[in-house]
Image: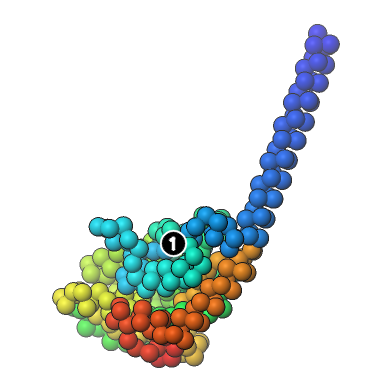
Amino acid sequence: MNNKLSERKKLLRRTLLTLSAAFMGLTFFAASYSEVRAADLLEQIKARGFIRVGTFSIPPEAWIDINTGEWKGIDADYTKALAASLGVEVDPILLNHASLVPAVESGRVDVIAALYKTPERAAVAAYNAEPFWYGMDVLITSKKNDGIKKFPDMKGMVLGVTRGSAQETEATELQKRFGIGDIKKYDAADPMLLDLKAGRINAALWWGYSFDYAAKQNPDYDFKVVEYIPPEYLGSDTLPANYYVFAKNGSESLIKAFDQQIRTMRENGEAKKILDSYGLSNPGYLTGKK
């Protein structure tokens, strides 16, 4: 009996050693592959012939046309031009805001188009140096609401924001400044706007360009702008800038290529042409100055 038990122990030990060695080999291979992938991301993108882009659905910044499946919008037009300069196509991957940074961290996407810069994002992801356009965020409410005419009127009120967006961070700063009550967070803009229309929240922070675009498409739009957020409310002298976002490691050459082409597009007028095509003719969208 003791001999059999001893043999079993030896067999178990050999099995565990074999499995351990195999696991260590797989771990080493995975780590090595990750390092190679990170080090040669631009080359891999060129080799595969397409770049995977994390995006979201908020017209006119970005959306997928349900009839054609085509990626459209400001971010789409910019990114397609950047991809063309690299000699590759784009593969847009639609995500909600909270999933974008984890997607670029994990390698599910090569780049995110596009996000404002926040300390939380900058801690885990890399930004390119050149903003390619600027946003104008707004406080909106229902057309029927006559009690909110400016930010100070939001004292004690409920404010809606999209989870994972820069407006979530902005809301915290505005809450401190104006005594805003609860901040209700949504995974997407549509349910936030439905709650605003129904009166379940008093107001919402939204992208000004999205409001302008929606109001232009629908003259009977249910919402109105209370106030555009002045940069000084957020401790800045410029409007919030839109950047491309990359993985922390191994994206240096890709970032350099993006920045070079963004400068070219700004200088040759292509950047302005894209913004103008979506009705964003205010110079602030290109310069960051309100």
The amino acid on which the numbered mark 1 sits, given as a three-letter code, is Val
The C terminus appears in which quarter of the rendering?
bottom left
Q: Position of residue 56 (x, y in %)?
A: 39, 64
Q: Is residue 240 left or right of residue 279?
A: right
Residue 54 drawn above or below residue 211: above
Looking at this view, is 285 or 47 the one in front?
47
Residue at the far front: name it.
Answer: 87
Q: Position of residue 149 (x, y in %)?
A: 28, 87
Residue 236 drawn above or below residue 11: below
The N terminus appears in which quarter of the rendering?
top right
Residue at x-position 49% and y-position 57%: 49
Q: Position of residue 92 (x, y in %)?
A: 41, 60
Give the structural element (helix, strand or loop) at label 1: strand
Residue at x-position 74% and y-position 26%: 15
One can see residue 263 in this view: yes
Q: Which residue is mark 1?
A: 90
Looking at this view, is 57 or 87 the one in front?
87
